[in-house]
Structure formats: structure tokens, C-alpha cells
């Protein structure tokens, strides 16, 4: 990840991606993670298992109920995801279309953008010696203000 996008407070984050080889038991959680881990603040998009549809999640800093937005879109086509994180608001876009917005429990501390691809935490597990592949064409980011 570009260093300029690490530890910043607010910003815009964009990536172009696809899963060219999906397999059961693999997922992504591309997220903004707090520099100082408060145990709950998290902004995730795109997220979920690669055999499911792409979703976005806002996990409030007070650990209250999360906001979840399902795009209904599959991982295997090329997509552009965008997170706009501003004071008091997070907006999620997929291919230029707004898929969700959160206005409660929005983190206000510095966060770092992380592209986390991993074995699925829920549901079916990845088979031994299996593999899957995500392609990322680019990442872009902008600071706030």
C-alpha cells in the first residue's frame, strides 16, 4: 500500500480488482484499520467470501450494530470499489454506483488501508492444497482536506 495512505485521518480509497480463480474457503476484507486498535473500529469494502457477493461493512467504534451493504455483484468480474471516509460519514461505491452510506459510529482517528485476502472465517473451509487468485489492476488514494 502506498505509505501516504497509512495512518491518515479521512480520505478516499479506490481499487480495481477481480477474482480470476475463485475457490471455496477464500475471502477478502479490504479495510481501513485503526492505527491504535480500539477493538472495534473498522471500515470494510470489498469484503466476503469469493464464492458469494461483494459487500461493505461499517463496524462502529462503540461496537454497536454494524451497517452492512450487499452489492449483489460477483467477485469474478472486474470492479472498481471506492470508500469515501469523511467526518461523520462513510460512503461505499461499486463501479461508480453508491451501494451504501453510514453516518453513525464513524471512526475519527487515523486508520491504515489494508488489502487482506485470507482463508474464510465462516462457512466452508479451503481444501488442503487448494488455491485461488485475486487480480488487482491498481489502487489509488486521496487525503482529506
Image (cartoon, helix red, strand yellow):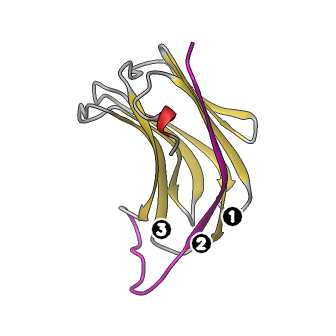
Badge 3: how crowded within 10 Å, few (<14), some, or many (20+)?
Answer: many
Of pointers 1 and 2, the one earlier in the residue sequence: 2
Relative depth, front residue between 84 and 111: 111
State left or right for residue 141 relative to residue 129: right
Q: Are marks 1 and 2 in contact (CB under 8 Å)?
A: yes
User: On the rendered image, what quadrant is the C terminus found in?
Assistant: top right
- CA distance separating discs 3 and 2: 8 Å
Helix or strand or loop: what does disc 1 sit on?
Answer: loop
x, y percent for residue 81: 65, 42
Q: Which mark is residue 76?
A: 1
Rendered location of residue 59, percent (x, y)? 38, 34
What residue is rendered at 42% in x and 77% in y? Answer: 126
Task: Give the Cα separation between the discs numbered 1 and 2.
Answer: 7 Å
Q: Which residues are magenta?
A: 122-145
Q: Residue at x 54, y 24 (%)?
A: 11
Disc on the earlier residue, 1 or 3 = 3
Dividing the picture into quarters, in which one does residue 135 lie?
A: bottom right
Residues at marks 1 and 3, CA–CA distance in whole angstroms: 13 Å
Dot 3 falls on a residue whose secondary structure is strand
Q: Position of residue 41 (x, y in %)?
A: 34, 31
Q: Nearest the camera: 20 or 52? A: 20
Q: Residue 67 or 92: which is nearer the viewer? A: 92
Please, what secondary structure does the residue beneath circle 2 have?
Answer: loop
- Image mark for residue 22: 2
* Furthest residue in direction bottom, as rendered: 129
State the residue position of label 3.
26
Amino acid at each position: 500500500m502506498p505509505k501516504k495512505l497509512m495512518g491518515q485521518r479521512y480520505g478516499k480509497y479506490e481499487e480495481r480488482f477481480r477474482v480470476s480463480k475463485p475457490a471455496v474457503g477464500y475471502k477478502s476484507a479490504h479495510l481501513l484499520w485503526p492505527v491504535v486498535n480500539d477493538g472495534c473500529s473498522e471500515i470494510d469494502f470489498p469484503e466476503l467470501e469469493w464464492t458469494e457477493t461483494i459487500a461493505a461493512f461499517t463496524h462502529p467504534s462503540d461496537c454497536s450494530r454494524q451497517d452492512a451493504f450487499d452489492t449483489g455483484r460477483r467477485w469474478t468480474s472486474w470492479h472498481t470499489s471506492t470508500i469515501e471516509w469523511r467526518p461523520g460519514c462513510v460512503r461505499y461505491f461499486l463501479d461508480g454506483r453508491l451501494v451504501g452510506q453510514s453516518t453513525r459510529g464513524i471512526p475519527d482517528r487515523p486508520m491504515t488501508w489494508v488489502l487482506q485476502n485470507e482463508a474464510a472465517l465462516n462457512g466452508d473451509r479451503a481444501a488442503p492444497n487448494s488455491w485461488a487468485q485475486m487480480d488487482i489492476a491498481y489502487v489509488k488514494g486521496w487525503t482529506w482536506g
